[in-house]
Image (spheres, rainbow, N blue to C red):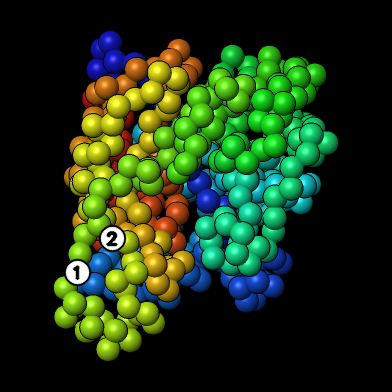
Amino acid sequence: MTENKPNIRAIALYLPQYHPIPENDEWWGKGFTEWTNVTKVTPRFKGHYQPQLPTDLGFYDLRLIDIMEQQAKLAKEHGISGFMYYHYWFNGKRVLEFPVNNLLKKKKPDFPFMLCWANENWSRNWDGGFNKVLLQQNYSLEDDRKHMEYLCSEVFSDERYIKIDNKPVFTVYKPEQFPDAKKTASLWNEICIEFGFKGIYLIKVESLTDRTPPADMNFDAALEFQPEWINLPARLSHSLIEKIKFILRGKVKLPFVRDKVFDYKQIKDRAIKKQLPAYKLYRGITPGWDNTPRRETGATILANSNPEIYGEWLQYLVANFQPYSGNENFIFINAWNEWAEGNHLEPCLKWGRKYLEVTKKIIENT
């Protein structure tokens, strides 16, 4: 970091769905993990980078704390300051909780972290909607209290948990779904004070439709989730002949005209030109996106992504970075290991460690 440059904490979003759980065994088949989807996909058009497969860490199982230590070591060596683990809570029922439970119990890895409550329905179509709901979110102030008391006693008290002025940082994916977000936020703040914290620092993820200023929900800041679905360029097109060839070769079950393909560089350009709001918004970035492993048809794909363009995007964010305070200094990278959505910093067969190396160079040396 050069002189007079602000300190930046790059936080990578982290998916814990790399170990079998009873629910996934029931819904998707015995032994299902995210790797099940990742390994079955095939390319859908010329130049389509699929399957995207891991190298350094292999097809890991997050029941092993050694793997989490290797991930943290790799992240720390390349300019990442912490992980934001997705957290799943359904009226007291937690799923995919083993990795975080394990790091809390074993006090490993020695690496900062925070949680993001992915408060979507779990549905068979993978998009958090209401079609074929497997686990549904139901809200109440009673459950809000139970949830926050669990977090304060079991998670926020950990010395590795990221806090701002002794306020645990907690992100909510869709607070607009709360019956009364202001009441929930106020209750959570009171409970955190009861547990000896100065309150709670709440971040809302900017959604596809909701742009409510955080203060209107008693939240502290917003997080720019990338790719930003409300700010997409025009789709790329593919020739009819190319589509027919892939259909005849059995590469897709339905015409892949239903897939939505965008150019990664155009996504980057639009993010850079975006007019920022007056409220606190932590900028986001993604190394790519391609959820064909989860979609037999109708996938969303950012084509032509590569470490160079990602580096240009990150360089812009760093060069124009303005922290809100000494500790309010986050950039969020989506994601560390979303292999089935094609957005991962973890090394892959095609790019190796190049995304990590670019991240390190820009975060540490700009």
In the displayed structure image, the side of residue 179 where residue 207 appears, left or right: left
Q: Amino acid at mark 2?
A: Val
Residue 32 higher or lower than 4, as above or below: below
Whether residue 11 is visible to the viewer of this picture, yes or no, is no
Residue 3, numbered label: none
Q: Secondary structure at mark 2?
A: strand
Residue 238, numbered label: 1
The quadrant the N terminus occupies is top left
Which tag, 2 or 1, sits closer to the chain's start? Answer: 1
Residue 15 higher or lower than 13, as above or below: below
295 or 107, which is in the foreground? 295
Q: Amino acid at mark 1?
A: His
Residue drawn at x 39%, y 82% is 253
Residue 148 higher or lower than 64, as above or below: above
Image position, residue 206 (x, y; %): 47, 36
In the displayed structure image, the side of residue 208 where residue 264 appears, left or right: left
Image position, residue 156 (x, y; %): 68, 30
89 or 216, which is in the foreground? 216
Mark 1 residue crowding within 10 angstroms, few (<14) / some (14–19) / many (20+) = few
Q: Secondary structure at mark 1?
A: loop
Farthest residue to the bottom: give it: 248
Q: Quadrant of residue 334?
A: top left
Q: Quadrant of residue 308?
A: top left
